[in-house]
Amino acid sequence: MAYPGSSLVLALLSMFSSLVLASSVTYDVVSLGAIADGKTDTTQAFVSAWTKACASVSSATIYVPAGRFYLRQVVFSGPCKNNAITVRIAGTLVAPSDYTVLGNIGTWLLFEQVNGVTISGGILDGQGTGLWACKASGNGCPSGATTLEFSNSNNIVVSALTSLNSQLYHIVVNGCQNVKMQGVKVIAPGNSPNTDGIHVQLSSSVTILNSKIGSGDDCISIGPGTTNLWIENVACGPGHGISIGSLGKDQQEAGVQNVTVTTITFTSTQNGVRIKSWGRSSNGFAKNILFQHVTMKDVQNPIVIDQNYCPSNQGCPGQVSGVQISDVTYQDIHGTSASEVALKFDCSSGYPCSGIRLENVKLTYNNQVAQASCVNAAGTSAGFVQPTGCL
């Protein structure tokens, strides 16, 4: 027997469910004209999907089904009328193989001034091999395009996304707040030039979790103006490691602070955990940095601070880095070095590194104790530290 008023309750529930279903809209790029053959230009279909999703007053999903979708540059601009747009990708987005199409544009897929965007799944194929070959030949080549960039945006989520063979950087976070990346894969060969995995700058509250990154440059690079960055459970290699910097390129520069890098494995990388700054005047800084629970496997330079960075000796010979590096902790770092000097602190003579702390560090070279080198660095050691005698 029905309870009194139960029919009214059911009617209200049905009405509520209908409202919820109606409040979220989905735009399938194929229904908007995209053809998944990897050859037909589908740029306009993606622009149309974004325009509709951005104009929606309720939450919206852009759906990319299985298949390969050829795209030229797409700029996904906000602000939008809602703060909950999901781009759900089951297929692969393919950049032009002709690198001149994107080579001087800067970014292939750009999200700017958006709030509450989630990208879930999919593969981004930057098709960068042609540009890499051009650069290797020494011919005049464009600099190349970043595959995916978020600029001046907030509350971004990137989940289970794969970025393959970018021309330049794979993913850039610039001028953003509250960004979470998880389950990201970056795949590029170790000899691919300037293909940083994830680059963060001028951003706060960025989290990078449970990701696997292999590239021809830094797995993760941390630029000026980065604060409250958390990196956890990342496998890096091939590549140049996880780098703070390079800092101090500009005289007036925002600093880097409150960075945690934890539970990382580096495999056959050029560097492990690195901080580097230009050897010239700057008011930049890096402070309150924690590197912990790190495994090194045949890493060329496991722990390094380099404050004399001066590529091609242009613009800085004979100068001293003005970047102040302080309160950096290395905790529970162990494994094997591919070079005899596993720990190298080459700090500024004008602004020496201070507050460096080594705690439970064990690095070996050819099954023997590795060496350490410290210049203009002050700090303390605790627990078991090998190599010893540096601070």
Image (spheres, rainbow, N blue to C red):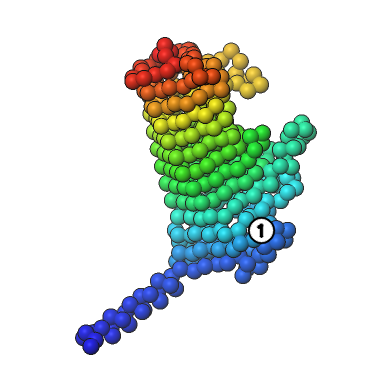
| Residue 245 visible in the current orientation | no
Vertical arrangement, residue 14 with respect to residue 303, above or below = below
State the residue at coordinates (33%, 77%).
13
- Does residue 333 appear left or right of residue 119 in this picture? left
Residue 85 at x, y percent in the picture? 48, 60
- What residue does disc 1 label? 68
Quadrant where the image shows the C terminus: top left
Q: Which of 83 and 333 lies nearest the eye of the viewer?
A: 333
Q: Looking at this rendering, what residue extends furthest in the front direction?
A: 367
Displayed quadrant of residue 331: top left
- Going 44% across and 31% down the picture, which residue do you hit? 294
Label 1 residue SS: strand
Horizontally, residue 17 falls left or right of residue 173, namely: left
Q: Is residue 2 visible?
A: yes
Q: Is residue 118 above or below residue 10?
A: above
Taking 285 as reference, is 70 above or below it?
below
Q: How many marks?
A: 1
For residue 140, side relative to residue 200 (left or right): right
Q: Nearer the viewer, residue 168 or 176?
A: 168
> Could you tell me which residue is drawn at 49 percent across and 48 percent down?
183
Q: In x, y percent, where is residue 42?
A: 67, 61
